[in-house]
Image (cartoon, coloured by chain):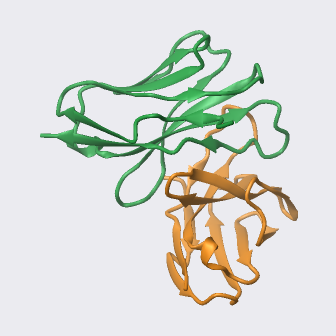
Chain colours: A green, B orange
Amino acid sequence: AQKITQTQPGMFVQEKEAVTLDCTYDTSDPSYGLFWYKQPSSGEMIFLIYQGSYDQQNATEGRYSLNFQKARKSANLVISASQLGDSAMYFCAMREGRQTGANNLFFGTGTRLTVIP
Amino acid sequence: DAGITQSPRHKVTETGTPVTLRCHQTENHRYMYWYRQDPGHGLRLIHYSYGVKDTDKGEVSDGYSVSRSKTEDFLLTLESATSSQTSVYFCAISEQGGLSYEQYFGPGTRLTVT
């Protein structure tokens, strides 16, 4: 089973509007971390935001916030006041606490966001 | 920006030839990772290292080997490249292996095996 599912291959948003990128995850581990990364057309992976499974509040970083719904196993990324520079691929990823050593990230397949002027 | 470089940035090679990709960091981070990125699969872990000479396999390790003789360098070797190894390879580093430690990624290496 996929550990991370991103069901939106592509999304469009008008500049200055808010947009939500969906992410659902699958784990039986009570301890886990959820991450969002941005990949612009230049190719680099940029860390955006982190949410721990035991965090009581939703994470926020500037215009990015994570809508964490633990019971639904969803960790949607909300980008407020979209800018043209937000056009990129966005990846949701998870790390499970029971992993020893690596704590590697499991990635979804990504959502391509296009911001329309 | 985290100090991570990858070399080469682009490489075209023939099937059956050995290839080594290099990841170099200036952050003195303990953990280093190699991922590959393919359409429809996101990023998948190939190998990782949790210290000098300490390495282990990820989920797609077949056909790859790694070495880490210094904290700052992590090498990925394709012993005999195949067309299925055509991909974009990313190196990542993490200060520690704990749950909340984000991974910082290098710029990537685009490898084409003909």
Is residue B65 positioned above or below B27 on the image?
Answer: below
Is residue B90 positioned above or below B110 on the image?
Answer: above
Q: Is residue A104 left or right of residue A74?
A: right
Q: Nearer the viewer, residue B76 or B73?
A: B76
Q: Nearer the viewer, residue B92 or A39?
A: A39
Q: Quadrant of the N terminus of chain A?
A: top right
Q: Quadrant of the C terminus of chain A?
A: top left
> Residue A41's x, y, as percent?
34, 57
Q: Is residue B5 left or right of residue A44?
A: right
Q: Quadrant of residue A64?
A: top left
Q: Quadrant of residue A116?
A: top left
Q: Is residue A24 left or right of residue A67?
A: right
Q: Residue at x 54, y 59 (%)?
A: B38
Q: Residue at x 57, y 50 (%)?
A: B104
> Residue A29's x, y, as percent?
77, 24
Q: Residue at x 66, y 32 (%)?
A: B100
